[in-house]
Amino acid sequence: MALVIGLTITATACADDVISRNVNDLPAAARTVLNKQFNNTKVSYIKIDKEIFQSTSYEIQLVNGWEVSFDSKGNWTEVDCKKTGTVPAYFIPTAIKNTVKDMFPNERITKIEKDSREYEVELSNDVDLKFDKKGNLKEVD
């Protein structure tokens, strides 16, 4: 038991967050997305979250207030534009775009998050929607 506790404490103590402004610290796929989707927006900072026994994640804060997160391979996991705008169409699957357009025609998608099972979308009216990976609406909150 003491060994498990010791390893947990060591792993937690060795976890390392790095703050950077250098986009070259990102995986190539993440750099490509930033260049194509946010070409005219400067990076304020990049938080690189390195966890022992887990993968690295990247949280990018743009100077316009938008936030973009990527996994260790450079796949986007979250785009948050709540402060100043609308999530770029590139990040929104067609089925989700169509559902939002049909059900909430006057609202903007201000945040989208995805994992291996689902998408979560937040609208400009603070309604939260959950979709499965195929874009089928599962929940409205």
Image (cartoon, helix red, strand yellow):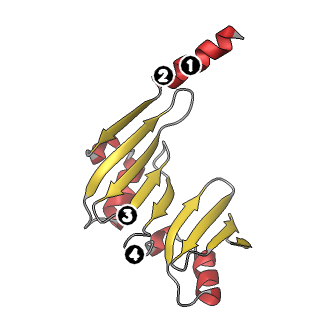
- Mark closest to the chain's N terminus, 1 or 3: 1
- Residue 105 placement, left or right of 85: right
Q: Amino acid at mark 3?
A: Trp
| Disc 4 residue type (three-letter) | Gly
Label 3 belongs to which residue?
Answer: 66
Q: Are marks 2 and 1 in contact (CB under 8 Å)?
A: yes
Q: Where residue 85 is drawn, which disc sits there? A: 4
| Disc nearest the viewer among 3 and 2 | 2
- The amino acid type, in three-letter code, at marker 2 is Ala
Calculate the distance from the C-alpha at mark 4 to the C-alpha at mark 3.
8 Å
- Residue sitting at 61 percent across and 65 percent down? 120
The residues bearing labels 1 and 3 have C-alpha atoms spaced at a distance of 34 Å
| 3D distance between C-alphas at marks 2 and 4 | 38 Å
Q: Amino acid at mark 1?
A: Ile
Q: Residue at x 48, y 44 (%)?
A: 73
Q: Earlier in the sequence, mark 4 or mark 3?
A: 3
User: Considering the numbered disc 1 on the image, is that residue within a helix, a strand or a loop?
Assistant: helix
Question: Element type at marker 4?
Answer: loop
- x, y percent for residue 2: 67, 9
> Whole-Å distance between the Cαs marked 3 and 2?
30 Å
User: Which residue reaches farthest top?
Assistant: 2
* Separation of residues labelled 2 and 1 (CA atoms): 6 Å
Q: Is residue 60 left or right of residue 14?
A: left
Pointer 1 residue: 9
Dot 2, how many residues are within 10 Å of its Cα: few (below 14), some (14-19), or many (20+)? few
- Find residue 13 and name its label: 2
Question: Mark 3 touching mark 2, by CB under 8 A?
Answer: no
Q: Is residue 37 above or below residue 108?
A: above
Task: Give yes or no for contact between labels 4 and 3 (Cβ–Cβ under 8 Å).
Answer: yes
> Considering only vertical position in the picture, is 15 above or below 32?
above
Helix, strand or loop at disc 2?
A: helix
